[in-house]
Image: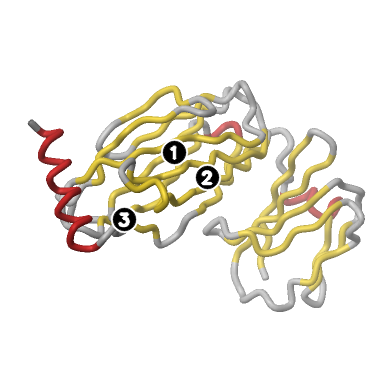
Amino acid sequence: MKKWIYILVALVVFNSHGFAQVFHFADSSTTIIKTTAQSPAHWYLEIYNDIGVDYPLRWKTHFFNIPAAWNINFDTQAGYFDPVLDGDSADFMLLDSLSFPQKLIIGAATNNTPGHGSVFMDIYDPLNPAGMVTIEYEFIITSVAAGIGEEETEIFFSIHHGYIEFLSSMDEFSVYSVSGQLLRSGDGNSTGCNILALSSGLYFLHVRKGQTFYTAKFSR
């Protein structure tokens, strides 16, 4: 019976609006920065219902550089999936009954394994796959032992006059806001990074040197 109700709703929506989009995201990507000691690492993106009724959607995963030791799970607030593997797909309900935006929550039990990778998820209406939106959950997981302590930060970089100067060789670096937004990045040829345009606040410097990941906080 419920299946026929959903089909009827779909027909009403599509007859009224063509193949109207039934959902949207305010943000389609997020970055989770944690240490292995903070496992499971999890965060969410919010999905918004644009049609005012519960409606079935579908998700499908694509992993990029996710360590085999990690266990990924996914919670749509209308269904929980564990484990989630590369290429997995399932239907879930886009809810209208919530008093807040519905959260699509990703989780990773990292099993003491550092890494830097992303889980991409195609979110779409099975009756209108052309309206697909791909969201990204980027994980930056550092080893507790590899984290840079306050007394060690000067070994890797110093900040002066709005400029990060790298004092040690590395393979790549990234600068993130506290909300996980990527602001600056570069490879091992970089000797520094201009941060003069960044507003005052707290930031994260992420550095990869070989297979080791380092994260340090700094203020601007």
First-in-chain label (2 vs 3): 3
Answer with the quarter of the image where residue 144 lies. top right
Asked which secondary structure carries label 2, the reply is strand
Cα gap from disc 3 to disc 1, whole angstroms: 19 Å
Amino acid type for the residue under numbered disc 3: Phe
Q: Of tags 3 and 1, which is closer to the observer?
A: 3
- Residue drawn 48% across the image and 31% down it: 40
Amino acid type for the residue under numbered disc 2: Tyr
Cα gap from disc 2 to disc 1, whole angstroms: 7 Å
Q: Position of residue 182 (x, y in %)?
A: 63, 59
Q: Is residue 96 left or right of residue 66?
A: left
How packed is label 3: few (under 14 Cα within 10 Å), some, or many (20 or more)?
many
The answer to whether mark 2 and mark 1 are in CB contact below 8 A is: yes
First-in-chain label (3 vs 1): 3
Residue under numbered circle 1 = 106
Quadrant where the C terminus is found in the figure: bottom right
- Residue drawn 30% across the image and 56% down it: 19
The answer to whether mark 3 and mark 1 are in CB contact below 8 A is: no
Amino acid type for the residue under numbered disc 1: Ile
Asked which secondary structure carries label 3, the reply is strand
Residue under numbered circle 2 = 137
Residue under numbered circle 3 = 23
First-in-chain label (2 vs 1): 1
Decide which of 79, 19 is in the foreground and name it. Answer: 19
Q: Position of residue 117 (x, y in %)?
A: 64, 39
Cα gap from disc 2 to disc 3, whole angstroms: 19 Å
